[in-house]
Amino acid sequence: MIESTSVKAPRILVIRGGAIGDFILTLPVLAALRDRFPRADIEVLGYPRVASLALTGNLAKAVHAIESPGLASFFARGGSFDLEWHEFFGQFTIVISYLFDPDRIFETNVKSCGPRQFIAAQHRPDEARPIHASDVFLKP
C-alpha cells in the first residue's frame, strides 16, 4: 500500500503498563501499527526498562516513562494537568491505551488534551475465552 506524500504521517502513542510479559504480548500491536503506518512516529508510554524492547525492534521511535510524577493528575477526576504532559498528549493523532481504566478517568483526561482519536483497548484478555492474549490486544 502506498501512502500519500501530501498527508502528514500520524503520530501514534501506545500506552502499556504491566510487567515484561504484558509488554511482550503487546509487541504484535506495535508491529501491526508499523506495517499499517510505515511512516508514522510510534511512541510508547510505559516502563522504560520493559518498553525499550520496542526501540530495539525498531517498532517505536521513543519510550516515555509512565511513572513520571507529572502524569499522576491524569488518573484523578478534575485534576490540574502538568502543562508538559498536556502538550505531549495533544501532539498525537492516535492514542491507544492498554491501561485498566474502568471509570474512564484517564481516558477523559487524555482526550481533553486534543488527540484526534483515543482507543481504549482491552487491558487483559477474557480468561473464559480461548483466544491468545496477543490476538485480543490486536482488536481495539
Image (cartoon, rainbow, N blue to C red):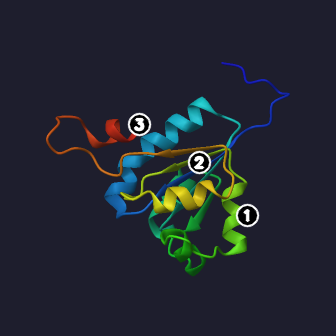
Left or right: residue 130 compared with residue 120: left
Mark 2 vs mark 1: which is more N-terminal? 2
Residue 133, by quadrant, is top left
Q: Secondary structure at mark 1?
A: helix
**Placement of the N terminus among the 4 image quadrants:** top right
Mark 3 vs mark 2: which is more N-terminal? 2
**Residue 114: percent from left, percent from top:** 69, 52
Which residue lies at the image location 85% right of the left edge and 28% below the top edge?
A: 6
Distance of mark 2 from mark 1, alpha carbons? Answer: 25 Å
Q: Secondary structure at mark 2?
A: loop
Q: Please name the residue that numbered disc 2 is placed on.
A: 58
Q: What amino acid is at disc 1?
A: Glu
In the rendered image, the vertical position of residue 135 relative to residue 95, given as above or below? above
Residue 9, by quadrant, is top right
User: How busy is the neighbourhood of tag 3: few (under 14 within 10 Å), some, or many (20 plus)?
Assistant: some
Distance of mark 3 from mark 2, alpha carbons? Answer: 18 Å
Q: Secondary structure at mark 3?
A: loop
Outermost top residue: 1
Disc 3 versus disc 2: nearer the observer:
3
**Residue 119: percent from left, percent from top:** 51, 44
Q: Nearer the viewer, residue 136 or 23?
A: 136
Outermost bottom residue: 69
Distance of mark 3 from mark 1, alpha carbons? Answer: 27 Å
Q: Please name the residue that numbered disc 3 is placed on.
A: 138
Q: Please name the residue that numbered disc 1 is placed on.
A: 87
**Residue 128: percent from left, percent from top:** 14, 41
Which residue lies at the image location 66% right of the left edge and 49% below the top edge?
A: 115
Q: What amino acid is at disc 2?
A: Asn
Which residue lies at the image location 43% right of the left edge and 38% below the top edge?
A: 140
Disc 3 versus disc 1: nearer the observer:
1
